[in-house]
Image: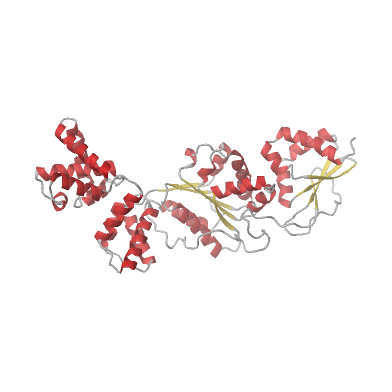
Amino acid sequence: MKNDVRQVWDDCLVVIRENVSEQSFKTWFEPIIPFKLINKRLIIQVPSQFFYEWLEDHYVKVLRKALDAAIGKDGQLEYTIIIDRGSQPKPQNAPAAPAAAGPKPAEFKPIKSPFDIKPFKDQAFESFLNNSYTFENYVEGDCNRLARAASYAVAQKPSTTSFNPLMIYGGVGLGKTHLVQAIGNFIVNNSDNFRNVLYVSSEKFTSQFINAIRENSLQDFMAFYMQVDVLILDDVQFLSGKEKTQETFFHIFNHLHQSGKQIVMTSDRPPRELSGMEDRLLSRFKWGLTADIQAPDLETRIAIIHNKVEEENATMESEVVEYLAHCIDSNVRELEGVVISLLADASLTKRTIDLDMAKHRIKSLVEENQKVISIDNIIETVTDYFKIKITDIKGKTRLREVVVPRQIAMFLAKEYTSLSLKAIGYHFGGRDHSTVIHAIQTINDLMDIDKELKSQIDNLKEKFKKK
């Protein structure tokens, strides 16, 4: 039998490498140090209590196969713990091996945080949460009711509901980050058992993982994340295509879930539409609850504006609130940004926010975002082209010289803006969405047979290109 402990362990590694993935080999076996060989008893040093438990839970068969090849069927394996979260290290034995006293392990070395802050050891844990994101200032509506209710349930009883993991998905700027950070803030302020709450974006997680590989500190990276009580991972879709990062997150996910910890994630689409993800990871995303957030409806947008105005201890006329809610109907972040901008302008210029100021700000926003044109620009251009008044096109007159330009303006509003039919109708004197549908269909039909009308619309489009 071989007497050199290094050679025996190298023989074990040959077998192990053949039976596990390369990333698993680097993560779980390269950090192991062969310590001593006593007869047929191989003693290895592992970095932590968790590391030992993970090997026993996931790789005991592989280790048994390696021992059989390197030592024989009667080979035995023992562990010693190098690092055990600050407690006095102690030897551990594999279940298949008889108990034996191990050598005195190395001195405790604190885990290095991938956030490059204090070591993770009985010190204040930085959650990276924004304290301003709470359930109290999150406006609930039909668009987000399920997501909000599930999030509040998780916040009250983390890991004890069936919502683990909780996946919140929806488009950009709809309030996903606000909602999941509200979960974190609630737990931090109300839970004694879940003290270590961590919010991290998937981009940050990936960057930390790459740095850990570069600096040979993957062990610290894994240990840090596996000791978190509540993990909030934002924009999980950005893990797409990053196979090694996904594998590491898979192991972290499994450990946290099996340890009774809470996992919360956000994405811009549901799990079934996430391409470039490992199937085993996607299957775990579906273990809990997946809830979507839709674009806010008109009533919710109005409530959001009122809420933001109240937060700033300001006031805003109802007609201005309604105008803003109709103009920006897809993005909460953009809507709040316009409100804050208007309040700042009013404060600096000592003016009252009126409809003209709001229209000017919307026009500026359209230009800043390099959109083609706003609905107000469309109405102004169409009325100028046909030599009619804005009050006429928004009024109730049914004269042909007004009705046709009105229908053309509605048609162009649908083509050049992202406004809903209801919002378009609002800008034309509060007309019903069915009137807008009729106008669009009428112009579509006439363009095929009325060359003059087709020419007029083409001329208007040319004007828009010059704006």
Horizontal side of residue 161 vs 354, given as left or right: right
Where residue 23 sits, quadrant-wise, is top right
Position in image of residue 399 (x %, y %) = 9, 45
Where residue 83 sits, quadrant-wise, is bottom right
Q: Is residue 419 visible?
A: yes
Residue projecting furthest to the left? 399
Give the position of the N terminus as an image quadrant. top right
Pick whichever, 270 or 100, lies toward us: 270
Residue projecting furthest to the front? 466
Pick whichever, 337 or 425, lies toward us: 337
Horizontal side of residue 366 vs 235, given as left or right: left
Q: How many marks?
A: 0
Question: In the picture shown, does residue 143 fall above or below 2?
Answer: below
Horizontal side of residue 397 vs 258, given as left or right: left
Position in image of residue 341 (x %, y %) = 35, 60
Residue projecting furthest to the top? 449
Question: In the picture shown, does residue 199 fall above or below 271?
Answer: below
User: Which color scheme does this rendered protein use?
Assistant: secondary structure
Position in image of residue 150 (x %, y %) = 47, 53
Question: In the picture shown, does residue 185 fall above or below 435?
Answer: below
Pick whichever, 341 or 331, lies toward us: 341
- Picture residue at 71% right of the left edge, 57% below the top: 110
Position in image of residue 137 (x %, y %) = 42, 62
Q: Is residue 432 visible?
A: no
Where residue 195 sits, quadrant-wise, is bottom right
Pick whichever, 187 or 362, lies toward us: 362
